Amino acid sequence: MAKTERFEKVYSQGKLNVMEIWVDKETGVNYVFHQSGYAGGITPLLDRNGNPIISPVLND
C-alpha cells in the first residue's frame, strides 16, 4: 500500500530566510511556514477577515 503525503508545498522563496506555503491535502487548509536560521514557525494562512484560506481538495 503506497503512503501518500498529507502536506504539499505549493510555494517557496528564500535560502536563509525561508517563506513557504503548505496545503493540507485532507482539509485544504493553507499554512505559512517561516524559517530564519535555526528558528522557525508555522501558522494557518488567514484572509483579511481572519478566516483560514482553504484550497479545493482533490480526491485522487
Image: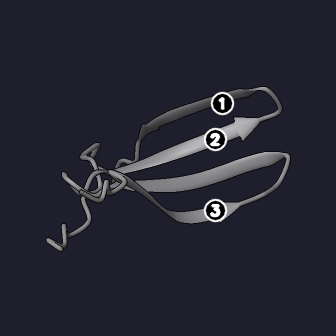
CA distance for labels 1 and 3: 14 Å
Q: What amino acid does circle 2 point to?
A: His
Q: Is residue 9 above or below residue 41?
A: below
Residue beneath disc 2: 34
Looking at the rendered structure, which numbered label has been put on residue 12? 3
Q: Is residue 16 above or below residue 11?
A: above
Quadrant where the N terminus is found in the figure: bottom left
Q: What amino acid does circle 1 point to?
A: Gly
Expressed as whole percent of the image width and height from the top left, the position of residue 42 reads 50, 35
SS for callout 3 = strand
Q: How many marks?
A: 3
The image's colouring method is one colour
CA distance for labels 1 and 2: 5 Å
Expressed as whole percent of the image width and height from the top left, the position of residue 57 reads 18, 67
Residue situated furthest front in the rendering: 1
Query: Could you tell me if the residues under marks 1 and 2 are in contact, i.e. CB atoms within 8 Å?
Result: yes
Is residue 60 left or right of 29 when viewed as pictured?
A: left
Is residue 6 left or right of 11 when viewed as pictured?
A: left
SS for callout 1 = strand
Mark sitting earlier along the chain (1/3): 3
SS for callout 2 = strand
Mark sitting earlier along the chain (3/2): 3
In-front residue for pair 50/33: 33
| Mark 2, other Cα within 10 Å: few <14 / some 14–19 / many ≥20 | some
Looking at the rendered structure, which numbered label has been put on residue 40? 1
| Mark 3, other Cα within 10 Å: few <14 / some 14–19 / many ≥20 | some
Residue at x 19% of width, y 51% of height: 27
Q: Is residue 11 above or below residue 35?
A: below
